[in-house]
Amino acid sequence: MEEPLQPKKPLGFWKTVLASFVGFIAANILCSIFAFFLFIVIVVGALASGSTPTEIRDGSVLKIDLSSISEIVTTDELSSFIPGMGSDEKPISLSQALASIRKAKADSRIRGIYLNVEGYSGGMASTADLREALKDFRSSGKFIISYADSYDQKAYYLSSVANKVILNPQGMVGLVGLASAPTFYRQALDKLGVKAHIFKVGTYKGAVEPFMLDKLSEPNREQISVYLNGLWDFMLREISASRSVPVDSLRAFADSGRAFGEA
């Protein structure tokens, strides 16, 4: 009587699977170890290359590039010390810029400041703080030179405190006055079927008007006009005092729209 055939166990298949799994794990471990050591080498190299302090020589000029200034600066700790990550232009905060100007005033090795206002986008309060710091710097007898291909209004207001304001021959000074252009949402909300529930007490409450009106109310127009005219008059007086140009001449330049045509 013949014995029934017993199915052979696929030992070779499972050996292959096990060997592949072990090889996969080993390869991942080796890659992780290699990546870790490569990371350590990059970090150590970056820290070593950045450990040399900047030497300030007698007669140095502090360069302030205002295109990279911000009220608050957040930093990526990883990209801050790994070469090739992040931007080469590191942003500086307003407080850092003000502290640098104060230190430069007290440092006998620094003769002056070179101010680059190209692409400046700071707020009006920050601009006024920077301008006061630069005025204080000039009181020490040191110079400030400003340059830009073109000056917008805030950039020129800030730069007007400098000893020399240099403009590219093909550039312009955008002194045009101040304006406000509120956006109103009531019609859009009506089309979307959105109802704004507004609680307003008092006359001069312009913050909620975009959600309930299609144009400025007269009280809101009045308060915006007072604010803008007061700020504009302040800027013109400051520029006039620094550049020795009459306020009426500055106002006439802005009103004529010469910033948009041939000077």
Image (cartoon, rainbow, N blue to C red):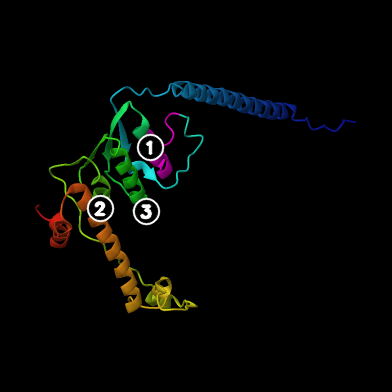
Determine whether the residue tagged by mark 1 lies in a helix, strand or loop. Answer: helix
Amino acid under disc 2: Glu
Q: Amino acid at mark 1?
A: Arg
Q: Earlier in the sequence, mark 2 or mark 1?
A: 1
Q: Circle 2 sits in a helix, a strand or a loop, which is it?
A: helix
Sequence-earlier tag: 2 or 3:
3
At x 67%, y 29%, the residue is 21
For residue 125, which numbered disc appears in the image?
A: 3
Q: Is residue 163 magenta?
A: no
User: Identity of the amino acid at label 3?
Assistant: Ala
Residue 181: x and y in percent read 30, 67
| 213 left or right of 156 in image | right
Rendered-image quadrant of the N terminus: top right
Q: Position of residue 92 (x, y in %)?
A: 40, 40
The mark lying in front, picked from 2 and 3, is: 2
State the residue at coordinates (53%, 26%): 39
Q: Residues in magenta? A: 83-103
Between 241 and 174, the one lying in front of the other is: 241
- The answer to whether residue 254 is seen in the rendering is yes
- Residue occupied by mark 2: 238
